[in-house]
Image (cartoon, rainbow, N blue to C red):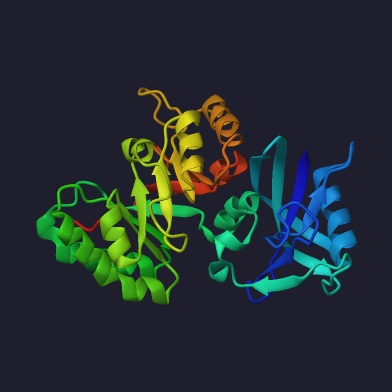
Amino acid sequence: MHVMAGLMVDAAGRVLLAERPAGKHLAGYWEFPGGKVEPGEAPLAALARELHEELGIELESAEPLIRVPWQYDDRQLLLDAWRVDRWKGAPQSMEGQALQWWEPDRIDPQSITPADRPILHALRLPNSYWMTPADVPFDRRDNCLKWMVDAIQNGVRLLQLNLPFWPVDSVRELAAALLTDARKRGAKILLHGDIEGALALDVGVHLNQAQSKSISERPLPWQQLVGVSCADPLQLNRATEIRADFATLPPRAAADHPQPSSDEWANFQAVIEKASLPVYATGTICPQHLAQARQHGAQGVAGTLLLWPT
């Protein structure tokens, strides 16, 4: 079943949710407005029709955000989510459903339908996910703090601290020192593999492949991000099973040709189209690949922060 979802974002950055009415599957949960694509109907036309029928508005422009395959018992869905920034008319309840405008970061993921949660994550997450270089020496920790403060002030909104040569407590101290500025600017900090530290600091965690295999459930509360490094479709499925917020996956690139080819990008797209969460392209990736990654269905690009001061 191909289902369209419209993320209507107003000038204040709020998004519209509709409550599923009594008597329907998942009654009482909230969802993004939309509905089924009719046979022979183009997806964008279906979205425009559904938003008109459900909210009484005329769609003017929208762009794809994420496609989420999902299964409820014996029903298989493809939830096709588009971000809607322009429309005519004031949204109103045409079918008796409750409507509510929300700031995306204030939405409780447990209050919306399970299939809509990956869409919420995609809406919240930036297009770029940055990591510290793994070889930053511990004796440069003061420089590292200044460098990352500058990065956050210059627009980095998702930052993983991956510093394997540092003592664990020192990485946590660095995260704590970044938090005030990060929260003021809406940036999210993740620790690499340190679930205990993430819980203590109220930050996110990025799990490696072995960790995602060893746990049976989401390791952090919903308000703290969980990312997973993946290398294949099975690992992406595992990330979905533990209810991670996003994953990273490298487009396959040959050793003698480090930049992904068009065939490798096509294979990457085929893999992530079966994933039920946002996926960043990583590996031999740089900011110049952002448009290409987005064209092939990625949330964006993930890589090492550039311009580490010498």
Residue at (47% x, 48% y) in the render: 244
Q: Nearer the viewer, residue 43 or 34?
A: 34
- Residue 191 coordinates in the image, percent (x, y): 30, 55
Instruction: Tell me the quadrant of the picture where the C terminus can be found.
Output: bottom left
Q: Is residue 262 visible?
A: yes
- Residue 257 coordinates in the image, percent (x, y): 40, 25
Instruction: Tell me the quadrant of the picture where the N terminus can be found.
Output: top right
In the displayed structure, does residue 32 sit left or right of residue 55?
Answer: left
Examine the image and state in which quarter residue 8 appears. bottom right
- For the image shown, how many numbered marks are present on the structure? 0
Residue that lies at the very extreme toward the left in this rendered image: 139
Q: Nearer the viewer, residue 133 or 90?
A: 90
In the displayed structure, does residue 110 sit left or right of residue 307?
Answer: right
Examine the image and state in which quarter residue 14 appears. bottom right
Residue at (57% x, 54% y) in the render: 122
Q: With respect to residue 110, does 250 lie above or below? A: above
Residue at (42% x, 49% y) in the render: 227
Q: Is residue 286 visible?
A: no
Residue at (46% x, 54% y) in the render: 128
In the displayed structure, does residue 131 sit left or right of residue 13?
Answer: left
- Residue 76 coordinates in the image, percent (x, y): 71, 36
In the displayed structure, does residue 205 sit left or right of residue 40?
Answer: left
Q: Nearer the viewer, residue 304 or 100?
A: 100
Q: With respect to residue 267, does 120 lie above or below? A: below
